[in-house]
Image: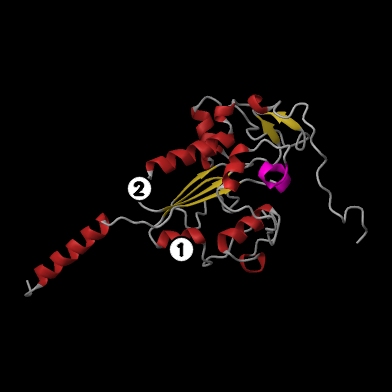
Amino acid sequence: MPLGQGNTSGAAHDQALAALRRKDDRPNILIMLTDQQRADTICAAGADWMITPNLNRLAAGGCLFTHAYSPNPICMPARHNLLTGLTARHHGCADNMHDHVMPHGLPTYPHLLSDDGYETRTIGKNHFRPRRRHHGYHRMQLMSEVPAFREEDDYLQYLQREGYGHIHNVHGVRNLLYMLPQRALMPEQHHGTTWVANQAIDFIQKNHGRHPWLLKLGWIAPHPPFNVPDEFADLYAGADIPMPAASALMGVSL
């Protein structure tokens, strides 16, 4: 053994051990995305007829942006804009094309955070193509609007384990009833909205103080179909709810 090699190895070992013991105080990052939700569905944003206590708490404890816009309001482009920080001109997703595959080599925020030591996870809806293309997430627990088969969807597998594997329209009936109020086909504790929240709580509790993490949550609601659990079906019964705001351009010939 060359002179001094043992001491060098010992020093490297001590440095590695010290790095493992050093507390990482970098902040955790939690991103929560609802789908197709307008500002006039949130009480804290001025819709005082809405019952949204948890969203109100988030608004009260942070920032409520009243003039925030997306370069593209359609689902897949907007999600890829957020994922890459780029517009459709660069990532190539201009609408909900089911055959679109984002070009390889584009940086994403999960990739960058993963490279810097963050644990990265996504739970719920992503609308990626292919569905399991991870884009830098260490683990994906998926809940898709229209999954092709059970084996690629974590929520469907959960329902099967809980005895609800026979349900076909787990997120509501899309044909004929797409924009009409419906009742969910499973109880509230097994609803997709609850499943995303419960998986998030479990992840946060298990990773408390271990290392910094990025957790992105994607709910399908309130995107139609509107499959409401029985417990909330009459929440607004008899309430005086105004008609939705209309664009000044409605009825104007362009």
Which residue is nearer to you in this view: 1 or 117? Answer: 117
Q: In the drawing, does residue 201 fall left or right of residue 70?
A: left
**Dominant secondary structure (helix, strand or loop) of the stretch shown in magenta:** helix
Q: Which residue lies furthest to the bottom in this view?
A: 3
Which residue is nearer to you in this view: 142 or 211? Answer: 211
Amino acid type indicated by mark 2: Gly
Between disc 2 and disc 1, whose residue precedes?
1
Q: Quadrant of residue 231?
A: top right
Task: Give percent across and percent down for residue 1.
Answer: 6, 71
Q: Mark 1 points at which residue?
A: 112
Q: Residue furthest front?
A: 60
Whether residue 46 appears in magenta in the rendering, the answer is: yes
Whether residue 44 appears in magenta in the rendering, the answer is: yes
Q: Mark 2 points at which residue?
A: 209
Figure colour scheme: secondary structure
Q: In which quarter of the image is residue 16?
A: bottom left
Residue drawn 73% across the image and 42% down it: 47
**Magenta span of residues:** 38-47
Q: Regarding mark 1 in the picture, which secondary structure is present there?
A: helix
